Image (cartoon, rainbow, N blue to C red):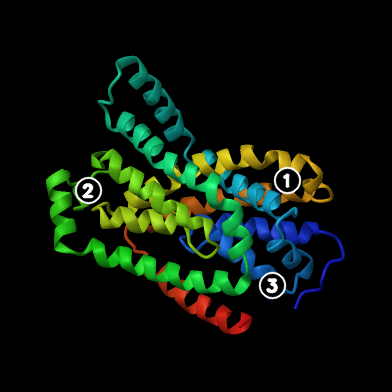
Amino acid sequence: MLPIASSLITYFQAIVLGVLQGVTELFPISSLGHTVIFPNLFGWNNIVRWQSQPESPWLAFVVMLHVGSAVGLLIYFWRTWVELVVAFFHTLRKRRADTPTERLAWLIIAATIPVGIFGLLLEHPVRVALAKPLTASIFLMVNGLILFGGEYFRRRAEVRALARREGMKDDGGRRLDTLEYREAGVIGAAQSTALVAGISRDGVVMSTGLARGLDHIDAARFAFLLATPPILLAGLYKFPDLTGHLGNGIRSEAVVAAVAAAVTAVFTVAFLMRYFKTRTLIPFAIYCLVFGFAMVLYNA
């Protein structure tokens, strides 16, 4: 085990957690689950003590980690976001969405509303109740089953028929802009399950997208775009915690962690956007089941 730090958190711990966040937020393997599991695995008891306390610096620190990964997503997709913002204002002027980009802008809004509502209502009680290493390990295994489920439903005949009916791309996947707003709302509500440590935000969105006929690359693209607004909004909402008394002793470390998460996220999303052109969620599902089971045994 690594040595236990006497301070709230060291810069080394902050950088490790930032890099871990930048990878696991975008890989469909639950960043929150890993952030809960790894301090216990490393013997970082100074951090473990935070995790289930109703009032602690932990949530402000975790929010900064997520903001860092969201900044990384913004850096990678900055051209897309400029197009989406311009398209959104065009729709306000025209009062309709005509182009695929204009429709995508409103699909993101439709999916963000439910996750925002659930986040405001459930984040605190869910974190206090479930942000524990053993519970996170169990839900990491559940996440693996969700990823397997997305791959299973993608192959079903009715899903292929849905893709053909709504409009297919050359690779056989349904076009992203053909999603209905109610489908985007369901995907956004499903994304709310990522409030539980061990459930991946991107994994749930991708699995739900696959079940609605999207191919892997569009499911991943939608997941990465959809992750950005709620993470940034949560950062704004929780920022006073970091500037208030709960942030005492961790502010500079939280900033360092966020920078590490942002830099790592840029490289991670670049890798995944290439990966999902030809590959599936199966390796991530296997990892979640195997690592989750190992951590259940370790933490039991």
Which mark sits nearer the N-terminus, 2 or 3?
Answer: 3
Q: Which element is circle 3 on?
A: helix
Q: Of 206 and 141, which appears nearest the observer?
A: 141
Q: Which residue is mark 1?
A: 255
**Horizontal side of residue 143 vs 18, given as left or right:** left
Q: Which residue is mark 2?
A: 174
Question: Hey, which quadrant is residue 3 in on the image?
Answer: bottom right
**Horizontal side of residue 260 vs 78, given as left or right:** right
Q: Residue furthest right?
A: 6
Which mark sits nearer the N-terminus, 1 or 3?
Answer: 3
Measure the C-alpha gap from mark 2 to mark 1.
Answer: 40 Å
- Quadrant of the drawing holding the C terminus: bottom right
Q: Position of residue 286 (x, y in %)?
A: 42, 74
Q: Which amino acid is tagged 2?
A: Arg
State whether residue 149 appears in this view.
yes
Q: Position of residue 147 (x, y in %)?
A: 37, 65
Q: Which residue is mark 3?
A: 40
Q: Residue at x 54, y 51 (%)?
A: 122
Which mark sits nearer the N-terminus, 2 or 1?
Answer: 2
**Horizontal side of residue 184 vs 236, given as left or right:** left
